[in-house]
Image (cartoon, coloured by chain):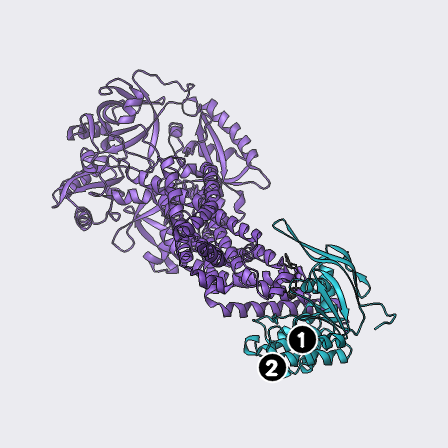
Chain colours: A cyan, B purple
Amino acid sequence: MTNNDTPLIKMAGLKKVFLTDEVETHALSGVHLDIQPGAFVTIAGPSGGGKSTLLSIMGLLDTPSEGKYELNGHPSENLSVRERAQLRNKAIGFIFQSFNLIGDLTVFENVELPLVYRNTPSTKRRTMVREALEQVGMEHRLNHYPSQLSGGQQQRVAVARALVGKPLILLADEPTGNLDSRSGEQVMSLLKGLHADGATICMVTHDPRYLKYAERTIHLFDGQIVDETDPAVLEAAI
Amino acid sequence: MATDPFASKFEQFMDTTRQDVRFSLRQMARSPWFSALVALTLAIGIGGSTAIFSVLKGIVLRELPYPEPERLVAVWEMQDGSISYQPFSGPDYLDVRAQSTTLQELGVTTGRWFNLAADGSPVRLEGARCTASLFRVLGVPPLHGRSFVEDEETEGNNHVVLLSHGLWQSQFGGEPDVVGRRVPVDGVPHEIVGVMPEDFEFPTPWGGRDTTQLWAPLVPPHEDSDRGWHSFGGVGRLADGVTLAEVEVELEAIAAQLAAAYPDTNAHTQMWVEPMMKRALGGVQKTMSFLLIVVALVLLIACANIASMLMARGAQRTPEIAIRSSVGADRHRLLRQLLTESLIQSIFGGIAGVALATWGVGALVAILPGNIPRVAGIEVDTPVLVFAALTTIAAGLLSGLAPALFAARTEIAVVLRDGLLGRGGSRGLNRFLGGLVAAQIAIGLMLVNAAVVLIMSYSNVVSQEMNFKTDEVMVAGISLLGPKYEEPHQRRAFYDELISRVQSVPGVIRAGLTGKLPLRGGSNGDVLVNDEIFDPSSGPGNLVEHSFIDEGYFDAMGIPLLAGRPFNAFDLEAASAAAGLDISPVELPLVINRTMAEQMWPGENALGKLVRPRSAEEHYRARVVGIVEDVMQWGAERPPLPEMYFPYTSEVWGPLWANLVVQAEGDPSPLAAAIRETVRRIDPQIPVAEPTTMAEILHQSTGRRRFAMLLMTLFAATALALIIAGTYGVMSYSVSQRTHEIGVRMALGADKALVIRHFLTRSARLFGPGLVLGLVGSLAASTLTRSMVFGVSPLNPIFVAAGVGAMIIVTSAAVTVPVLRATRVNPVEALKAE
Ligand SMILES: Nc1ncnc2c1ncn2[C@@H]1O[C@H](COP(=O)(O)OP(=O)(O)OP(=O)(O)O)[C@@H](O)[C@H]1O
Ligand SMILES: [Mg+2]
């Protein structure tokens, strides 16, 4: 995919060093990465390779130790904590391996949360939440609590929460990791459908079966991108 | 969209608040026990503070119930420039009232007993004589009728009385037509001229509670020879715009003028004023403020407690906080949510606290010592509720802020990646929790120390050698008033009859009479001893307490004789004859106490020595015939002053008021009825006060100290309970966080003893700084509590050690259970759980 649009994600020379008990861990050591709007990128690589770290930085949950990161053309270095929170709210939708729904909130309230934090009026919130839940096929479970849902259903609610605010990009860290293969398939086809409708997605996965969904796969090894593969080639290799 | 930016902002605010409140309530409902514990802890802190505040408000912060109360002042005389509460003499009062322009009005009063026989059966009432001007000073009109007029301040015209509302209700059935009715007061018909309103409070210049039921006009003595006789409490109202200092300047000038005109009596007399409010409180403010500080400390412990509970729980909520921030909640928003939760918790605690306070105020008023003034205003009313509301908000913020700040600082990336919180609370959080425990222990130690010191002080006060019998001695007040008892020999005949009849009551060992009782104050005067001569220009003389007694008093009261002899019938007869004949000067027999003997005649035998009044006129001349052991005169805490005992018959007008003293073989209370009956048989018109024991009088005189001690002990115990709960909570949390670590240690070969040692060392590290801090705090506070300490040093190493020991026991108890639990960790399980 080569076009002249400004990339949605633009990372250059990105490094991340963790300091724990005087041991330095180089989780990322010089990552260059552009993601165009509408792309579906997967990140693969061995455990400890830095995949989650990269996604956290992309989602403004964490800051790089060095290097440049621009989100939708805005440099992220000079953002205040508050601006980061606002940008996260507007531009990013997260999906986690361990669904991360709030147990004391109903399905509706969980999905509503990003809209609440951007002060959307409640009538408008209601229609948007409904739409999002319809998209993931969970509109009939509005008043259930997460504990009353299966894992696959929880993850679909989490997807609804990620997309309800119409973010610029969906970030998913092993979204199928805690699911059986059938539920995993369901979630993946959901993401595929969203991508078909124009969503930009960046997903970390260990599972080679799902690499095929993406147009582009990045391999992270020891904090560096070692290879970019066409999914077709990869599939052939397995 | 929104047209009015303000309206939409408000809507947003309400929307957010609604959500936060709903979420808080849901959370509370999900862990009802935890919520109940938090609410209970807060209720104790808020309820205690509110109850004490309502007492303080009722007594101290309430205005005096008179128009423009800030203009009311107590006016006193004093000698030789040292501030003392010397009452006015009649002529001095008249002169000041006539000359002062800075005082708009000045009145005087003196308390006394009245015998009222409204419907035939006599009752003995506390009342007051006061000038007509006093009611003008107060500015409170009677409910019915009128108050006194100047004309009634002369002998013969003064047979009028004003009734208190309570007396009107109890003795006259609240009938409005009592005004104008004539009733026998002290055996003489008096006209009722008025009834005071229900909420009227008569000033108590000498402090204490207003118990006045009846007023009669005061006829101020106006002879110059009366200037040495000080017995009237002055109450004045400042003229418009006049300051206290201006009054004192004027009084100084008047006093100087009187000193020049009447050097024999007034050479050293000065006058001073004090705001009536300060007077009305009579020192109670200090006790109550002290207790408010104490209860605020308890509240602080409660807040620290809740903070640590919330923080331990906050750790469990880390994922929720992380998720919220991943979808864009910023710190402000999170803080707001968490503080809303604390406030909601706190409101529940506040409501329970107010309920507790409402009950507690009733209990407090019931145990308030009788000499604490103005209890009528103590209730949970609007200002108290406002105080409770503010305390609730403060407690909510105080207990919620630190946990919220820590929670909002969650490292979201880590938490979200792991899906659960990383093991072990953050080091900062653990350190803060440790700080909270240390602070609680420090405050707890201060409270426990204060309680120990107050308990010891109280025990010292009540276990002092009183030098009189307490449990076996019963006393009853009698006033011999009325035309039948105008002559001293008439009174003497009554008392002789009374004593001999009471002595023959079975169970009575000895009966006697005294004008005043130990511990109950009295009167005093300067004396000259040996061959000293009166010199008005010389400095202060020897101030000596005066008592008038009969020959049976020392035996009946159980006061030991040290030397010489007590009075005998002959002494009384001689004194009486002399008084009757008005031979002046008369040489009277005199018994003095040990302190007087040691002060006036150190190293000498006081027997046979001569005592005279320090005045131009020599009313008496007395020779020491006996020395008795000291008894305390002014309460149970002031060391005995020099005292002299005269035969009661030596006083021309004494004793109109006497106390019958009866020593019984055992418990004297069954004798009460017999004593009343004996008096009734001699003269049915003479009422007797409810007989009481000296033990009860001692009990009353230590009431304020007991009150402070009881509350202090209660609060310290509450604090300890909170601290046990809080320390237990924090230690359980810390142990539960370390289950994995313990498992690893045990897998690597550590045995139980090692694990226990590990945790005890950790606890010691927590408690050590708390104890040190508490000790420093106790030292600092000891200057505050000095006035409440009796016979002990707050720095006494034994008490300090006792306090520290108590804290160590308490905290050890709190850590034992969690630590024992830690030793039962199964290493296999613990490691698998990871
Ligand atoms: N908060 C942290 N503190 C210290 N080191 C960290 C932290 N987070 C990650 N690391 C380290 O950074 C490196 C990269 O971790 P990361 O979680 O990004 O790997 P990953 O590729 O997501 O692995 P996995 O496939 O197991 O999830 C690892 O060595 C890890 O130990
Ligand atoms: Mg990972």
Name which residue type carries label 1.
Answer: Val
Residue designated by label 1? A159
Q: Residue furthest top?
A: B531
Quadrant of ligand 2: it is bottom right
Q: Position of residue A127 (x, y in %)?
A: 70, 80
| Chain on which label 2 sits | A
Q: Is residue B527 above or below residue B738?
A: above
Name which residue type carries label 2.
Answer: Arg
| Residue A141 badge | 2
Q: Position of residue B240 (x, y in %)?
A: 58, 42
Q: Is residue B179 above or below residue B491?
A: below
The answer to whether marks 1 and 2 mark residues whose Cβ atoms lie closer than 8 Å is no
Q: Nearer the viewer, residue B137 or A72?
A: A72
Please tell me which residue is depicted at 41% across the width and 18% down the height of the picture. Answer: B538
Q: Position of residue B207 (x, y in %)?
A: 41, 42
Please tell me which residue is depicted at 45% across the width and 39% down the height of the picture. Answer: B775
Quadrant containing the C terminus of chain A is: bottom right
Numbered disc in front, either 1 or 2: 1
| Residue B10 badge | none
Q: Are marks 1 and 2 on the same chain?
A: yes
Q: Residue furthest front?
A: A237
The answer to whether B149 appears left or right of B167 in the picture is: right
Q: Is residue A28 above or below residue B585?
A: below
**Quadrant of res B525:** top left
Alpha-carbon distance for marks 1 and 2? 14 Å
The answer to whether residue B731 is visible is: yes
Number of other residues with Cα within 10 Å of mark 1, as a class: few under 14, some 14 to 19, many 20 or more: many
Q: Nearer the viewer, residue B288 or B714?
A: B714
Element at label 1: helix
**Quadrant of res B242:** top right
| Chain on which label 1 sits | A
